[in-house]
Every structure is written in structure tokens, then in C-alpha cells.
Amino acid sequence: MTEPTTEPTTELTAPSFVKPLFLGELHESIVLPYPRMAPDEHARIDTLTTQLREWAAANYDERDVEQQRWIPDATVRALGEMGMLGLYVEQQYGGLGLSQTGYCRMFEVLSGIDATLGVVLGVHQSIGYKGIHLFGSDEQKQRFLPDLASGRRLAGFALTEPHAGSDAYHLETTCELQPDGSYVLNGEKRYIGNGSRADVLTTFARTPSGGHVALLLESDTDGFEVGDRYDTMGLRANDLRRLRFRDVRVPKENVLGSEGQGFAIAMQILNNGRMSLGSGSVAAARSLTDMAIAHVTQREQFGRPLAEFELVQDKIGWMVAYTYGLEAMSYLTTGLVDRGLQDYSLESAIVKVAGTDFIWQAANRAFQLAGGKAYLRSEPYEKILRDIRIFPIFEGANDVLRSYIALNGIEPVAAQLSGLSHLGLRDPITAVGVVADYVGAMVRRKVQPPKLRGTQERFASHAEVVSDQVEQLRAVTERLLRRHGEAITARQAHHKRLAAAVTDIYAQIATLARVSDVLERPEQGMIGDEPFIAETFCLRAADRVRRQFDQIEHNDDARTFDIARAAYGRARYHHSV
């Protein structure tokens, strides 16, 4: 057994940290002190990181891998021997037994070596066999995990279909229960990573009753067909395939969970996978920032280094500050999972959206700073651009996740308000009780507003601002609910604003928690400008929150939507000089 993965903390006061923010509640004891890995695991990660980087420098050529369109089998075996294919799997099943934070730290290194390497290994363990780890029986774990953790077998995740992408609930792949407890599977999946290489595919289908089931499909099963490979813009060594099932019989011992749990299992697996996309984004951001700094400090124009020009400093400063905030938020999230947070669905979605949007913007800036040489295929920039463009799309398209974040945050507020919206005069006693409870809750929020008190005194003003914004988030959410009622589910422009606001609120809290922890532990080797970076990030994030709240009331949504509908009617851009 491994030691505790994070330092001890008090019992968690809520099942989620982000969801209560919409209620105007700030459970600071959940996030303070900032979670850290236990010293023994930290030492293991340092050793593993050094070992992996030294191995990759001598044995891994990302351009050669891209040209071959797959990671060589010998490479997969070598990574398996190092434990890189079983990072979080319990040691009793042959894995390294790392915490969620430890896993994401290693995933950051893998992604920094090559984005395709990160994706292939992420498909394998972030989502491919994660369901076995989370929901598998003892027998299933014993049967599958040792081979998967060692790399003797590879895993995949088969959810997306031709007509069920972001709307994953409405799967068309079907399966019927047989008298012997097995299922017969028919249908088609597409865009499946490790498609022809995976020996075990966690596959999802709909039953005749309309429920969902999760199945562990082994690739040598009769009726399973691997279709043509997709020719992709980036991640060209990822074996992306169409899969078909023609009367595929999956034995009862390969049913994951029970019938009816399939969709919930899929969503929980994706919640976990999104955290590694956050840490992968941190890796990409660091790499891009380092490349940009190296170029602008060495390249001279107009008689001085590019680094001295303000517009260059603007880009570099933005990249450094945002990377710091993203890193703080990503590893706060993994730390909360290690502390036992029950519901981290919004936290993981936030990290995924913020991270994958940011690295695209950061890549564009780094490309711009590199100038004409960035356009050459001999340079790394074009491959980075090709590889990362898919990140805001897979494991939940970012626009869909924005609505997901907003609507899941709105839900508890709606539950509090529902008692008021349905009151009648025929039951005055009940009405008085509900109104009294609601008014009492409002008074308590005013008397005891959300406060972030546990940060260093230096950051008191920033803590005050973000505390006020938590209170505003509740007020704005309530106002939208009263104005739109159930129609709020369709007001996606407001979803985007709420999601952006709560993301920057969460990021400020994470950043303040992180930098406060650093100041309290100077022996850890704080870089002198770290507080300044944290303050800069928080100032900018707070300003973005203010703009989002302002646009709830003052926007040109109706005008923009009218323009779009008119363009639809013409089926093209119709205007000319």
C-alpha cells in the first residue's frame, strides 16, 4: 500500500467546491491549505520524471513516430516496463499506485515529450481502462489490469457515434440481453483512439428499455470489425478508427457495473480524463513559453533583442501569468480528488475548457513571436498547432461543457427557488414556512457573506474581491432564473458568461491558495516574483469576471442572433462592395 497522497486536512464540508459557489457559498476549508503530495510520492515522481525524460531523449523521436503513424511496439513495451501504462493502477495489479495528482504530474511529462504520446497513453489509461479501475469487480480487475498496466495489452474507449457525439446520451448502438447474461451488440462507433491497436475497449450501448450499459469488448471477439483509419490533421500517430459491431456477443463477466449504469459510468470516466487534459495543457503551455523566451532573448532586431520590446513582453507576461493560474487550478483539482472530494465534475470540466482554450491562444502567440521560421516544417511550431487543435473538441467539446458547467451550477439555485415559484394561497402555513426559510437564508448570506480568510495577508484585497464575486455569482444566477425560468436551459450565451465567470473565480481562489502556501513554506524554494505573478493573474481574472457579469445585462445577443439567422436564410455571406 502507498502512503497518503496528500497532507492531512479537515473533513470536507461539501461534496463539491465549485457547485456551492453558485449558491454564494465559499467552503474555504476544502481548498486551504493548498493540497500537496506526500513527500514520499513527491520523491517517486521526481525519480520517475528523470528516468522518463532521459529515456525519451535517447529513444523517442516524435517526427519519426508521426511518420510511422504509430508508436513502435518496442517503445510501448519499454514504457510499460517503466510503469508509464499503469500509473494509477494499484500495486497489487502491477501498477505504480500513484495518486490523481501523481498521475497528472507524470501525464504532464508524457505530453511534454510529444502530444501524440500523451494522447495514446491517455486513451489507454485516462479513459480506456479507467472504468475497470473505478467500477470493475475484483475478478475483472484481476483479469484485465495486470496486462493493461504493463502494456502487454492496450485499451480504448468507444463512446462516440456518427449521430451521437456531444449528445452522447442518445446512442444508437444497441445491445440485447441474452438468457445466459451476455449481451449481443450491434452498431457503429467513430473517432475511436487506439482503434485497431486496443485489445480491450470500454464500449457503451443502449438496451431495448432505453437504458445504457458499459461493456468490456475484447478485440478478438467474432463480429467486431475495425474500419478505415481517419487521416487527421494532427496527432497523426494516433490510430483513430471507425468500429463496427455485427452481432458481437459480450459475455456477462465483461459487463461493467450493471444495466442502466452505462451513461453514468461514461460520464465519470470522462470527468477523470478531463483532469489529465488540464495537466497536459500545463505541459504544452510551459513548453511554448520556454520556446518563446529562448527565441526572443536570442533574436535581435533594430539593434536590440526582441525581448526588450513592449509588445513582446506583453505576450510573454501574459503566457507566464496565465500558465501559473492554470497550473494552480489544475493541481488544486487533482488535490481535491486525492482529498476525497465526491463530486468534481464541474472542477474537471473547468480545467479542461480553460486549459485547452488557453494553449491554442498561447501557441498562436508563440508562433507570432517566432516569426517566419515558425512556418517551416523543420521547426516544432507547426506540429504543435496541428496536434493541439483537437483538444478543445474531444472529451467533451468546450462549448458543450460551458453549458454543462453553467446548468449544473444553476441547478442547486433553482432547487432553492422552486419552493417560491410554485407557492399558492391555499396552503398559507406551508407558504409562510418556505418564505421564512428562504428569507432566513438570504439574511444569513448577508450577515455571513462568503469569505476567503485563510490566504496570506499580502493578498487580502484580492481575497476580498473574489469573495464579493462569489456573492455576485449567486445574485446573477438567481436573477437569470427569475427572468427566464425553465427557458434558461436554452440561453447559451448566458451559459458561456456564467461558465467563464465561475472559471475565473475558481482560478483566483486556486492561485491565492497556491501562492499563500508557497509563502508559508519558503524552504520549498519560492521564485522571487511568484507573488507578483499571482497578483497579476488575479487582477486580470477579476476584471474578466466583472465583464462577464456586466454582459449579462448589457449585450448585443439579439442583434448577433438576428444576423446569424439572416445568413442561414441566404445560405451564404451575401454582401459585397
Image (cartoon, rainbow, N blue to C red):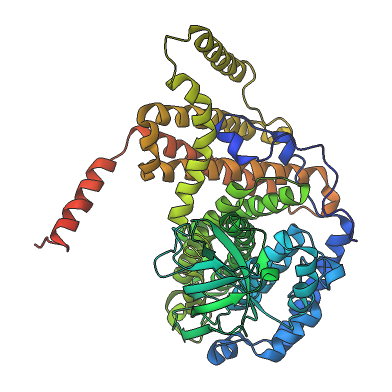
Q: Position of residue 438 (x, y in %)?
A: 54, 17
- Please give left or right for residue 167 compared with residue 540 in the image: left
Residue 273 visible in the displayed image: yes
Quadrant of the rendered structure where residue 124 is?
A: bottom right
Q: Position of residue 452 (x, y in %)?
A: 67, 31
Quadrant of the rendered structure where residue 92 is?
A: bottom right
Q: Is residue 55 above or below residue 352?
A: below
Q: How many marks?
A: 0
Q: Is residue 503 above or below residue 426?
A: below
- Please give left or right for residue 257 compared with residue 302 in the image: right
Residue 159 visible in the displayed image: no
Q: Position of residue 356 (x, y in %)?
A: 52, 61
Say which of 486 and 111 sits in front: 486
Q: Is residue 62 above or below residue 561?
A: below
Q: Position of residue 409 (x, y in %)?
A: 53, 39
Q: Residue at x 62, y 80 (%)?
A: 198
Q: Quadrant of the N terminus?
A: bottom right
Say which of 410 and 65 sits in front: 410
Q: Residue furthest left?
A: 577
Say which of 81 and 525 sits in front: 81
Q: Residue at x 39, y 66 (%)?
A: 163
- Please give left or right for residue 6 compared with residue 359 in the image: right
Q: Residue at x 54, y 15 (%)?
A: 434
Q: Is residue 419 above or below residue 102?
A: above
Q: Residue at x 77, y 47 (%)?
A: 339
Q: Quadrant of the C terminus?
A: bottom left
